[in-house]
Image: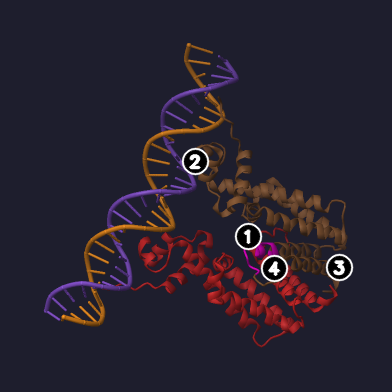
Chain colours: A brown, B red, C purple, D orange
Amino acid sequence: MPRERLTPDALVSAAADLADEIGFDHLTLSALAKRSGVRDASLYTHIGGLADLRERVAMLALGEWADALGEAIAGRSGHTALTAFADTYRTLAMGRPGRYAATRHPVPPDRLAASGDAARIIDVCYALLRGYDLSEPDATDAVRLLRSTLHGFSDLEATGGFTADHSLDTSWHRAVEALHHTLTHWSDI
Amino acid sequence: MPRERLTPDALVSAAADLADEIGFDHLTLSALAKRSGVRDASLYTHIGGLADLRERVAMLALGEWADALGEAIAGRSGHTALTAFADTYRTLAMGRPGRYAATRHPVPPDRLAASGDAARIIDVCYALLRGYDLSEPDATDAVRLLRSTLHGFSDLEATGGFTADHSLDTSWHRAVEALHHTLTHWSDI
DNA sequence: TCCGCCTTCCTAATGATCCTAGGGAAGGTC
DNA sequence: GACCTTCCCTAGGATCATTAGGAAGGCGGA
């Protein structure tokens, strides 16, 4: 009886799940092979090695991120869109830590450009800002501030950087409100 | 002729320099041993292993961070202090990438508490906010926002997350000004 | 002086992991 | 029926973390 055929996509998907369970840093070929019911060396038929696997997982995660964030702001604008965007971002970061770490894994620019996923995320950010009436170059500065704030908070939360005995939900909410305020009053800054 | 004696402190310092050169993720015992003119196994006389080394480097980096940030805001307040704090933060993050990555390496809470370095950084953040007239629990929310923004920007910049053809210095400056505006108008948010 | 003890570093060996080279089976094609 | 491609295998080399045990030198006490 023939065994289930492996494919690069199935492997990358399994690797992403594995990363969510054990952490992106602990993703190894041995572990992936074991889970896939195959020997280490057999993986090389489908992927180029560990570095290639990591980059593929990173791109998968970026694509999923772009999908989820794009869906969150669809049909919304302004404060509503920002809140949906931010909450989706944080929920993903907390719920899929391996994939979230993967989105920060450096991927060669040409490979990134070829997939288009990174660009889609940036596009979603710009779409979000349409409700705030910003034009270049302010829009780029604002996108960078937005991404920095959400990423910084999520990363610090995920790595245990916040230790004070105070609700993280509250702090997150205040941070998003502060962003809204900043974006609304951008020209005054 | 007796060779130069190794000490844990000297090893950790060398490891931090090595991390700045090759990246915290690529810090290995073999590389540290080679640089120290000693065999891998000899390191175990001074440190507990790779995990222990990483945590020690993390605590060293946190201490240096606290020193530099504390010095940056000494004798300053309000906008001046915020600018000095932020610029010092980014300069350190860019100039010492291995140490910066180390500051985000998870360290067991008890060990962190024993060193006191993490608490010093938080203290510096609270000291910085004294110029903005915030009281609890707003101060904690504000500290979290401050750290999130600076960390998020530095991390995205360091990992190549910003690709738009627009000055990063400008975006950083705008982000800091936005923080200042937010902190100044905290009660309106 | 000599003897044991401690510190520091060594060699040797084990096991995990990544990766390459080359072989064999299954199935399609000429 | 011979050939080719695909997929997975075994075998083995390289790097790395880690443990075990031994040699060299310093130091204190008999």
Q: Measured from the top left, where is residue B109 in percent x and y? A: 57, 69
Q: Which residues are magenta?
A: A152-162
Calculate the distance from the C-alpha at mark 3 to the C-alpha at mark 2: 53 Å
Are the two marked residues, 2 and 1, in contact with CB atoms closer than 8 angstroms? no
The numbered mark, 1 or 4, whose residue comes first in the sequence reads: 4
Chain under label 1? B
Are the two marked residues, 1 and 3, in contact with CB atoms closer than 8 angstroms? no
Chain under label 2? A
Question: Which residue lies under the disc numbered 4?
Answer: B148
The numbered mark, 3 or 2, whose residue comes first in the sequence reads: 2
Badge 2 and badge 4 both on one subunit:
no
Question: Which residue lies under the disc numbered 1?
Answer: B159
Q: Which mark is residue A184?
A: 3
Nearer to us of marks 2 and 1 is 2
At x 77%, y 59%, the residue is A86
**Which quadrant does the C terminus of chain A fall into?**
bottom right
Label 1 SS: loop
> Does any portion of residue A45 appear in the rendered image?
yes
Amino acid type of the residue tagged 1 in the rendering? Thr
Amino acid type of the residue tagged 2 in the rendering? Asp
Question: Which residue lies under the disc numbered 2?
Answer: A40
Q: Nearer the viewer, residue A68 or B159?
A: A68
Are the two marked residues, 3 and 2, in contact with CB atoms closer than 8 angstroms? no
Query: How many circles with numbers are drawn on the protein?
Result: 4
Calculate the distance from the C-alpha at mark 2 to the C-alpha at mark 1: 29 Å
Calculate the distance from the C-alpha at mark 2 to the C-alpha at mark 4: 40 Å
Mark 1, Cα crowd under 10 Å, few <14 / some 14-19 / many 20+, is few
In this rendering, the answer to whether B2 lies above or below A94 is below
**Does the magenta portion include A161?**
yes
Magenta span: predominant SS is helix
Q: Measured from the top left, where is residue B64 in percent x and y? A: 55, 76
